Amino acid sequence: GQQLNQSPQSMFIQEGEDVSMNCTSSSIFNTWLWYKQDPGEGPVLLIALYKAGELTSNGRLTAQFGITRKDSFLNISASIPSDVGIYFCAAFTGANSKLTFGKGITLSVRP
Amino acid sequence: EADIYQTPRYLVIGTGKKITLECSQTMGHDKMYWYQQDPGMELHLIHYSYGVNSTEKGDLSSESTVSRIRTEHFPLTLESARPSHTSQYLCASSEGGRAQPQHFGDGTRLSIL
């Protein structure tokens, strides 16, 4: 089946540092999404990517849709304490509208 | 922000009870979804609907059932709750058409004693 791989499971960084997260697969996807989930809440959409090679920014966040269509990355610059949470990648194939999710990366930011 | 609401936010209830988790959205989205998520873990799709009177089972088998009588409303029911049903249940919706991002509610955290 289609799987999205996110690793490591947890990341620990110092406030002010940049951090990059990858999401990879052996399958091709046509749309990539990045979500952030705070404790006790639902995931919130951060960035959506629709075209191979696309680079999109949302404030301090930048995400890219890999040229092979098999991966995506999310970069957070100048991290702050409220960046703490679980970051999920998700992707659609063209075959149906069901969304495949990665297992998420838990980000901790030390003040 | 997406306008999708789930109630209750938390529910602690005994084994054998019938439970209905409510989900409503005010965006007129055709597609709605239910996911199950254990703490800190990935999301598993358990039900989805592409419109009124349309419901399908998701990738993860679930003893719950759903209905879609109105566009804005997609309740999930457990006829007889068991401890194994303890989890967080997340509802989402999206516009019709392919590859539309899903917008999530804040979830219901369910504990069955």
Image (cartoon, rainbow, N blue to C red):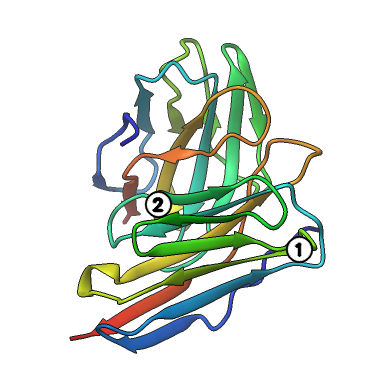
Give the number of marks. 2
* Residue at 44% in and 38% down: B103
Q: Is the residue B11 above or below the residue A36 in the image?
A: above
Measured as percent of width and height from the top left, residue B97 is found at: 65, 24
Query: As rendered, which of B4 and A66 lies closer to the eye?
Result: A66
Is residue B49 shown left or right of residue A106? right
> Which mark sits nearer the N-terminus, 1 or 2?
2
Q: Is the residue B79 above or below the residue A40 in the image?
A: above
Quarter of the image holding residue B39? bottom left
- Locate the C terminus of chain B by quadrant: bottom left
> What's the mark number on residue A43?
2
Say which element carries label 2. Answer: loop
The residue pinned by badge 1 equals A70
* Residue at 37% in and 29% down: B23
Measured as percent of width and height from the top left, residue A8 is found at: 54, 83
Is residue B102 shown left or right of residue A51? left
Q: Label 1 vs label 2: CA separation?
A: 22 Å
Q: Can residue B83 be seen in this view?
A: no
Quarter of the image holding residue B9? top left
Is residue B35 shown left or right of residue A61? right
Q: What amino acid does circle 1 point to?
A: Lys
Label 1: how many Cα within 10 Å (few below 14, some 14–19, many 20+): some
Q: What amino acid does circle 2 point to?
A: Pro
* Residue at 41% in and 75% down: A106
Pointer 2 indicates a residue of which chain? A
Query: As rendered, which of A76 and B3 lies closer to the eye?
Result: A76
Measured as percent of width and height from the top left, residue B36 is found at: 49, 50
Query: As rendered, which of A111 and A10 lies closer to the eye?
Result: A111
Q: Is the residue A1 above or below the residue A31 in the image?
A: below
Measured as percent of width and height from the top left, residue B21 is found at: 36, 33
* Residue at 80% in and 63% down: A68
